Image: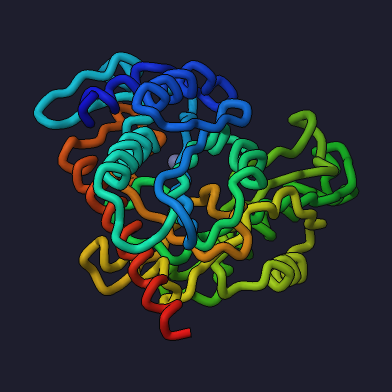
Amino acid sequence: MDLAALLQSLVAIPSVSGSEGALADHISALLTAKGVRVNRQGHSLWFEVGEGAPRLLFLSHLDTIPPCEGWTTDPLNPQWENGRIHGLGANDAKGCVASLIMASRALSAQPSEDAGTAIFAFAAEEETEGKGTQAMLPHLGNIDAAVVCEPTSLQVCTAQRGRLVLKCSAKGTAAHAAHARLGENAIHTAARDIAKLESLSFEPHALLGVTRPVVTTIQGGRVRNQVPDHCEFFVDIRTTPNLKEEEVLRTIAGELESAVTVVSSEYCPTATHPSEPIVRAALVASNTTSSVGSNTTSDWVFLGDIPAVKAGPGDTHRSHRPDEWVSLNELKAGTVFYTNLAKAYYRIKSTEDVHV
Ligand SMILES: [Zn+2]
């Protein structure tokens, strides 16, 4: 199966988070037919190419979000047209998966001169809470570095924003709307807090820029003729690696009259130092000298101390939108990029080991 047919087959199999089984079966059968030993954990898959150290993980995901409104083509009946394919998950991240499968074939057909093992891992449930990657990681053995394969237009991302979600509760005193001075209006309190949040910003990160809190939902009041005694709103903060979460929290809690509680802080911001071999190898493979930051979260957050970059074919701005697409040229470039990245990484590591 060539690259175009491979991606078309991947997109044609629905794989909304939690229902990736049929897609995992399909990929597993394709690889097994080529003599690859495929491992499976739930709906996540992984396999290895090469041998010995260092061990480099290529991590991507099989799942998609559910189709949204506004598609002008059938999201589950992808067709190639003028070198582009439209379909749910074509860009995020089945294009990456297809490029990785082709890269794995290139690496087995033409093994690198330097020793090394590439672990190709395709996780389930990335779009929900990253459960697939978290369950699979302990089975992958030792990992020296990782490439998180998501659409970045093949730019090398070395810093990724995290996410902190806060619940803010404004308390007031209920009263008849005709005697409003007897009460204390919780919605007015929330409004003052929201105005403060709008003008708040945190110290910018070199690659990711400034961080500002975003108020995303609000709920308050029971009936139209009563001063509300309660108003609740949620705040989403896409944190950067230079910010300490406790300080962000302390600053916000100190500014607001509302009570602030943390709803979610699992997605920590991440960054990899430019001197890490994985960054140098990725820059060599992408023919550039500088890395970029990425605003979206990914399974990178679950990799802990493993030095990692995020890079892949396709464009993040086309993800989670109607008429999502990716081009064959992007996928071909992705295959070459991942193949060269593995080889460059093994080479850099082998020369490093000589110096040690
Ligand atoms: Zn993705």
Instruction: Please identify the residue farthest to the bottom as the structure is shown.
Output: 355
Residue 84 vs 241, above or below: the answer is above
Q: Where is residue 274 in the image (x, y as percent from the top left)?
A: 41, 76
- Which quadrant: the N terminus? top left
Picture quadrant where residue 350 is located: bottom left
- The residue at 67%/46% (across/down) is 138
Front residue of this view, candidates 80 and 168: 80
Can you see residue 34?
yes
- The residue at 53%/53% (across/down) is 300
Front residue of this view, candidates 233 and 267: 267
- The residue at 37%/77% (across/down) is 351
- The residue at 32%/34% (across/down) is 98
Q: Position of residue 206 (x, y in %)?
A: 43, 76
Q: Position of residue 264 (x, y in %)?
A: 71, 49
- Location of ligand 1 given as a quarter of the image: top left
Picture quadrant where residue 198 is located: bottom right
Colour convention of the picture: rainbow
Residue 9 vs 252, above or below: the answer is above
Residue 249 vs 171, above or below: the answer is below
Front residue of this view, candidates 335 and 197: 335
Can you see residue 127?
no
Q: How many labels does the image show?
A: 0
Q: Along the horizontal axis of the image, is 180 left or right of 146?
A: right
Q: Position of residue 311 (x, y in %)?
A: 36, 54
